[in-house]
Image: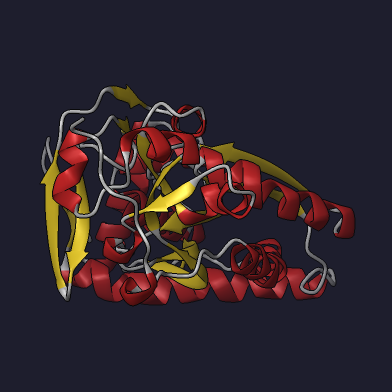
């Protein structure tokens, strides 16, 4: 069996965490994957994976070999591209993902500008309101909002956003402005389930974080619909700052309890660090980073100084 093929299969299994998933990515049958790994283990005289019917873990030998295996594939890929003069010319197909609302408002315009400049690259944009697995789903670059827990990803910060409560001026004129987080229980709350999965709002009280729970009048699983309902005067909803910055500037929505809003969270472009960083990925990240930073900077809602906040009397109990 081809030794290079064995190495490619080994790295693919290590990345995917599964023989079946690696086989699907490489278009190999499960027996073919098993044969390649068995041949590699026979050659090394040691097991590279501990496998049962329910789990797959890499051994110490496999972990040590993995670093060298990746280096071999990187060197080979670089040599082939240099031979045909492709190292400096980004080309191929790129798959990028983001949440639905962020993709519509920020990512898609950047992708369009990117395609206009790089004619040899095509792009698939996946707008999904869930965390994707880059390896399993064949994604090159993802936009992640919030802290990153996966240490196997390279992250480039492009900005930050805040969770913010908003309501229409008409609603606040009718029902009054909440003076404290506890007042939310007496208001009509529109829960966007993507940001309020437990029907509660996390807020800051000085340096400590607390939460207030409530029974929403309306639950919506789409941010745009929840914001539209709030703009219509139906109640108070939660949004990420970039979603409502323009509406706040135009006076269609008003921040509520902004002095208690949680700290900003990062927005990052992430991609895999353990795979070859192809020219198309590197070029897209370099292209998108400054443009997304500008878009997010233009959509910043400054945090409110509590000493400058003016509120109306809460009449929600009337």
Asked whether 200 or 128 is in front, the reply is 200
Is residue 21 shown above or below 249?
above
Position of residue 231 in the picture relative to residue 290 (left or right): left
Query: Which quadrant would residue 24 be assigned to in this image?
Result: top left
Residue drawn at x 55%, y 51% is 248
Q: In the rendered image, which quarter contains the C terminus?
A: top left
Residue drawn at x 20%, y 54% is 202
Q: Which colour scheme is used?
A: secondary structure
Position of residue 316 in the picture relative to residue 255 (left or right): left
Position of residue 129 in the picture relative to residue 204 (left or right): right
Query: Which quadrant would residue 10 be assigned to in this image?
Result: bottom left
Residue drawn at x 85%, y 72% is 85
Question: Residue 127 at what x, y percent from top left?
Answer: 55, 38
Is residue 231 shown above or below 148?
above
Q: Is residue 47 visible?
A: no
Position of residue 155 in the picture relative to residue 290 (left or right): left
Is residue 223 shown above or below 140?
above
Question: Residue 95 at what x, y percent from top left?
Answer: 61, 46
Asked whether 309 or 210 is in front, the reply is 309
Question: Residue 33 at what x, y percent from top left?
Answer: 37, 41
Asked whether 206 or 272 is in front, the reply is 206
Residue drawn at x 17%, y 55% is 57
Q: Can residue 2 be seen in this view?
A: yes
Is residue 230 shown above or below 109?
above
Question: Residue 150 at what x, y percent from top left?
Answer: 31, 62
Asked whether 128 or 201 is in front, the reply is 201
């Amino acid at each position: 069996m081809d030794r290079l093929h064995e190495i490619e299969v080994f790295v693919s299994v290590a990345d995917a965490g599964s023989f079946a998933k690696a086989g699907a990515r490489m278009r190999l049958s499960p027996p073919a994957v098993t044969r390649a790994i068995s041949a590699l283990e026979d050659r090394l005289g040691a097991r590279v994976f501990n496998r049962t019917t329910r789990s797959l873990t890499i051994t110490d030998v496999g972990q040590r070999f993995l670093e060298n295996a990746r280096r071999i594939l990187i060197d080979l890929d670089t040599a082939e591209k240099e031979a045909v003069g492709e190292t400096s010319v980004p080309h191929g197909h790129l798959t990028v993902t983001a949440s639905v609302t962020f993709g519509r408002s920020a990512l898609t315009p950047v992708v369009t500008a990117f395609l206009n400049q790089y004619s040899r690259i095509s792009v698939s944009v996946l707008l999904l309101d869930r965390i994707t697995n880059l390896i399993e789903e064949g994604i090159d670059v993802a936009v992640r909002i919030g802290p990153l827990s996966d240490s196997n990803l390279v992250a480039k910060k492009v900005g930050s956003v805040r969770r913010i409560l908003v309501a229409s001026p008409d609603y606040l004129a009718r029902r009054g402005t909440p003076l404290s987080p506890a007042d939310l229980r007496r208001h009509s709350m529109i829960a966007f389930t993507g940001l309020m999965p437990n029907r509660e709002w996390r807020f800051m009280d000085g340096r400590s974080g607390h939460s207030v729970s409530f029974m929403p009048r309306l639950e919506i699983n789409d941010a745009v619909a929840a914001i539209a309902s709030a703009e219509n005067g139906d109640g108070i909803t939660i949004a990420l700052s970039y979603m409502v910055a323009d509406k706040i500037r135009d006076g269609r929505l008003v921040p509520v309890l902004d002095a208690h809003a949680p700290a900003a969270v990062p927005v990052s472009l992430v991609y895999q660090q353990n795979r070859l960083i192809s020219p198309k990925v590197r070029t897209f990240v370099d292209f998108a980073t400054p443009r997304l930073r500008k878009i997010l900077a233009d959509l910043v809602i400054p945090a409110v100084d509590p000493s400058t906040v003016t509120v109306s009397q809460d009449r929600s109990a009337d």
